[in-house]
Image (cartoon, rainbow, N blue to C red):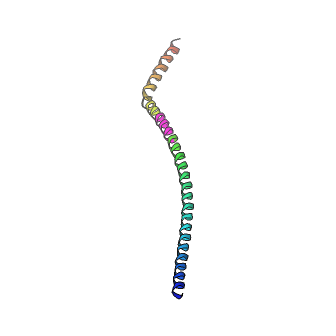
Amino acid sequence: MNGESEVVGEVNDRVDKLVEEIDRAIGLIEGLRTENSTLKQQCRTLQDQVSQDEKLIAEIRSERDELHSTYEENASLIEHRGEIQDKIEAMLKRLNSLNVVT
């Protein structure tokens, strides 16, 4: 009997250890599920932020292109400013010459 009770005691100890390990594994799984859920939510939040940032970048690029176009137009006007001034002065001289004659 003594040997049998030792075997039963040893089996009970091993079963208790197995139960402890299963409880620990369940705890780890629950913790990982919670962490996974948190990470999925963070991922969705980051994806939304990336989407918003991409829209903002597209808007900024569009504005940059418009500004560049305006700059090019202004640069062209500045480049031709002398010619335009010469033409205006010639017109004013012609108009002044009409006023002097009358």
Q: Residue at x 54, y 63 (%)?
A: 32
Q: Does 72 appear above or below 95?
A: below
Q: Nearer the viewer, residue 67 or 60?
A: 60
Q: Residue at x 53, y 68 (%)?
A: 25
What is the residue that sits farthest to the top in this orientation? 102
Q: Is residue 69 magenta?
A: yes
Q: How many numbered marks are there? A: 0
Q: Residue at x 51, y 12 (%)?
A: 101
Q: Nearer the viewer, residue 97 or 72?
A: 72
Q: Main secondary structure of the magenta part?
A: helix
Where, quadrant-wise, is the N terminus in this rendering? Answer: bottom right
What is the residue that sits farthest to the front in this orientation? 1
**Could you say where residue 14 lies in the image, as x and y percent from the top left?**
52, 77
**Could you say where residue 21 lies in the image, as x and y percent from the top left?**
53, 72
Q: Residue at x 57, y 54 (%)?
A: 41
**Could you say where residue 45 lies in the image, as x and y percent from the top left?**
56, 52
Q: Nearer the viewer, residue 53 or 20?
A: 20
Q: Is residue 46 magenta?
A: no
Q: Quadrant of residue 86?
A: top left
Q: Does 67 appear above or below 10?
A: above
Q: Nearer the viewer, residue 88 or 59?
A: 59
> Residues in magenta?
60-71
**Could you say where residue 19 lies in the image, as x and y percent from the top left?**
55, 73
